[in-house]
Amino acid sequence: MNPSTSDLPVAQVKAELFKAMGHPARIRVLETLSEGERTVGEIASLVDLEMSTLSQQLAVLRRAGVVTTRRQGNSIHYALRDERMSQLLAVARQIIVSSLRDSREMLESLDGRP
């Protein structure tokens, strides 16, 4: 079944969302924000990134509308724009774990191990 022409903009928006998530550092930032709002300094220490690298990654996520910011004094706080992002990350993890289990089982059967 071919997607209708009206579905193409939706597909493009989805592709842009996944593109914004398409870097390991950004995934780590999103996983950290899944636990709740964080300051830039907190994020930097939790994901072990240089501040310049973190700023670049946060800018990509901000432009994509994946995270929100608020200023409190001298601190900038980041949060997920939509809490369902946490669910998306959790499902992605489940898919990866399932795939790895399947691969392990296949390897064990090929290797003759029970």
Image: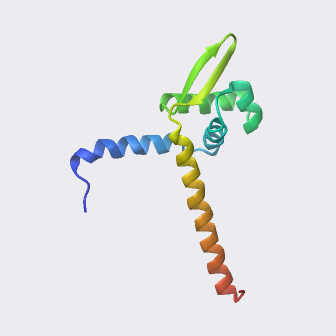
Give coordinates of residue 68: x percent, y percent: 54, 26
Does 18 appear above or below 45?
below
Going by the image, does 8 lie left or right of 93?
left
| Quarter the C terminus occupies | bottom right
Q: Position of residue 112 (x, y in %)?
A: 70, 89
Q: Where is the N terminus found, in terms of image quarters?
A: bottom left
For the image, the number of numbered tags is: 0
Q: How is the image coloured?
A: rainbow
The answer to whether residue 113 is above or below residue 54 is below
At horizontal 65% and vertical 85% (from top left) the residue drawn is 109
Q: Is residue 45 left or right of residue 23?
A: right
| Residue at the image point whose x is 35% and y is 46% from the top | 11
**Residue 15 location, quadrant:** top left
Q: Residue at x 46, y 41 (%)?
A: 17
Of all residues, the one furthest to the top in this rendering is 73
**Does residue 59 appear to the left or right of 111 in the view shown?**
left
Q: Position of residue 94 (x, y in %)?
A: 59, 58
Front residue of this view, candidates 78 and 11: 78
Instruction: Determine the image quadrant of residue 73.
Output: top right
Q: In the image, 11: left or right of 97?
A: left
Image coordinates for residue 106, horizontal then vertical, percent: 62, 80
Residue that appears at 73% across and 35% down: 49
Q: Which of the 4 image quadrants contains residue 105?
A: bottom right
Viewer-side residue, 39 vs 24: 39
Residue most toward the bottom?
A: 112
